[in-house]
Structures are given as C-alpha cells and as structure tokens.
Image: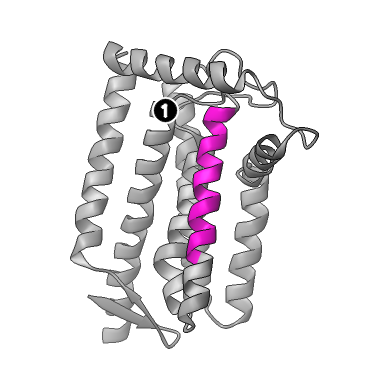
Amino acid sequence: MSIKRNNHIINFSKGYLIIGIICSLIFGITCFLIQTNFQPLINMEQSLMESFQKTFNYPQMNYDGEFLQTFMTFSATLGNPIAYIIITATFALVLFINKFKDLSLWFLGVISTGGLLGAVMKRIFQRPRPMGHLIQDKGFSFPSGHAIGSTLFFLTILLVFIPLIKNKGIRICISMLSIGLWAAILFSRLYFNAHYLGDLIAGISFASFWVLAGLYVYNVTSKEKSAK
C-alpha cells in the first residue's frame, strides 16, 4: 500500500501496522510493570545500572575526557529537547521551502505531538531518576524523553525520507549514520545514569508506535484527498 504526494512515494505496508500494534503492546506492558513496581524488572534494571556505574563510574558531561566521554557528551547534547526543536524546525522549513508542504506539516505534527505526550506521561508516572544522575537531568525518568525524541526523529528519517534518495550509496551512508547516532543517544542515557532500561524501552516503543500511526493517518488522509 502506498501513497503519492509531491511526486514522491511513501510506502505503508501491512508489516508496519503489525509492528505498530506490537510496539503499543510493549509500551502498555512496560507502563503496567513500572506502575505496579514489578520486582523482577526493577531488580534487572538496578543490576544493569550498577553494572554501568561499576564500568563507567559517574561520568559528567564535558569534552575534556577520552573519546567515549566526549562522544557520549555529544550524543546526550544532540538528544536534548532544545536541539531537537531546532533540528526538527530546520528540517521542516527546508521541506516547506522545497514545496513539500504536506510532508513538512506532517513531520512537525508527529514530532511535536509525540514529544508533548511524552512530557505529559512523565507527569503522570512521576518515576524518580536513578541515583547518581547528572544535576542537569531534571524532571522525572519515565518514559525517557531522549528515547522518545530520538526515535521520533530518526525513525521518521529512516522510514520516510531516506527512501526518497535516489543514490543507493548515499541512502546506505545516511541510514548507517542515523542508526549510529540513534543508538548512541540511547546508550548515553544509561552511560550518564539518566534513565533505567524500562524508561528507554517505553520511550522507544511509544515513539515507534506514534510514527507508524502517523504514517497510517497520512496514508489514509492523502488517499481521501486524491479521490476528491
């Protein structure tokens, strides 16, 4: 199943629908386990956190350390909400200027609404951050805002925009770069003791569902416009 807008094809397969349902289930189950303080999950999260602290100690965000420290600081900064707002707005503006109005508005809508819902859920669950987190990491822990933001952005890039690039080599390079930065941002949240594993799982699964749901809505509404 596909739609054509601005002379470009955006594919939406049945597989996306299945993956979206699976992501929503993972998110719902994770929320339930965290809300009910499911001890096996809590113990596993704590063990993983202690392992990270034993391996990396309690690193601070700066560019004065070794390569890993510098790269993790860059990754965490890239995943900052302010950075995402700037990057998303710039990307949407470029699309709009190049006459991709519908895609531009859709992109802004998916990223902004997903981020806002993530902020609301933090207030609902009010899960404290792990011990030893950075001073600048304020607010609640669940779900991870960095996980939501990075997944919303990079998954949209991977599913929607990279397939529009004609050159295969460029597609592969940008895909690898996107996946690498996405993974680095997620890893940095554990590295800096900013989140538990469940926070990341919830953020990734929710954002994945939101992007796929957005693609489905875009698909349906675009077909209706084309039929008129």
**Which is nearer the eye, 218 or 90?**
90
Q: Where is residue 115 in the image (x, y as percent from the top left)?
A: 50, 45
Q: How is the image coloured?
A: one colour
* Above or below 73: residue 108: below
Taking the spot 70% from the left edge, 40% from the top edge, the residue there is: 67
Please say whether residue 200 is one of the residues in the magenta stretch. no
Specify whether residue 26 is in view.
Answer: yes
Q: What stretch is highlighted in magenta?
A: 175-191
Identity of the amino acid at label 1?
Answer: Leu
Q: In which quarter of the image is residue 34?
A: top left
Q: Quadrant of residue 99?
A: bottom right
Q: Quadrant of the N terminus?
A: bottom left
Q: Where is residue 93 in the image (x, y as percent from the top left)?
A: 63, 70
* Above or below 19: residue 13: below
* Above or below 221: residue 21: above
Specify whether residue 228 is in view.
Answer: no
Taking the spot 37% from the left edge, 35% from the top edge, the residue there is: 201
Q: Quadrant of the C terminus?
A: bottom left
Taking the image as shown, residue 87 lies to the left or right of residue 66, namely left
* Above or below 203: residue 3: below
Residue where numbered disc 1 is placed = 197
Please say whether residue 182 is one of the residues in the magenta stretch. yes
Q: Where is residue 197 in the image (x, y as percent from the top left)?
A: 42, 27
Q: In which quarter of the image is residue 97?
A: bottom right
Taking the image as shown, residue 145 lies to the left or right of residue 11, namely right
